Image (cartoon, rainbow, N blue to C red):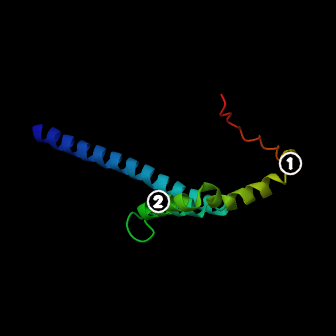
Amino acid sequence: MEKFWMYFGIASFVFACVTVFLVLWKRRENRRYDSVELASKLREWGLDMFADLFLAYGVGNYAGEKSVLRIVRNLVSRIKDEGVPVMLGKLFWKLLAHFLTEDESRTRIKQMVEDADRVAARKPADPLPEPTIDSAA
């Protein structure tokens, strides 16, 4: 009877370990699947570099030409070289097209453009005269 409990304990331990492993594996696979879906959405909106990053993570590419680390390095160097506004230019135009389909948003955008035109049309103020130093004092 003593051997029975020993084997039962070993079998229970193995079963628990396998169950925990499978649960954690499933969570990891779900996270990767979600990452690939997010990559396709990001690509639709014009965020190709971020899409490449999430896709590389989703397929588990940690080494090689299109690896996660290489993509992050390229992303950082591109931000340093071009700046964020240049990188997000495609996204801006897609978002603008999206918001132009809504009446309220179109009105707000029109108001912002009119304000910008008014500011651009103003003449710059006359510069202040250079200060003079009175040497007699």
x, y percent for residue 59: 46, 63
Q: Is residue 19 left or right of residue 82?
A: left
The residue to which callout 2 is attached is: 72
* Front position among marks 2 and 1: 1
Res 78 visible: yes
Distance from label 2 to label 1 (Cα)? 45 Å
Please name whichever residue, 126 or 24, is drawn nearer the observer in this view of the structure: 126
Residue lying at the far left of the rendered structure: 2
Q: Residue at x 42, y 71 (%)?
A: 65
Q: Residues within 10 Å of mark 1 (few under 14, many from 20)?
A: few
Question: Of the residues under marks 2 and 1, which one precedes in the sequence?
Answer: 2
SS state under label 1 = loop
x, y percent for residue 45: 67, 60
SS state under label 2 = helix
Q: Give amino acid for label 1.
A: Lys
Q: Residue at x 34, y 45 (%)?
A: 20
Q: Is residue 120 left or right of residue 94?
A: right
Q: Give amino acid for label 2.
A: Val
x, y percent for residue 10: 19, 44
The residue to which callout 1 is attached is: 123
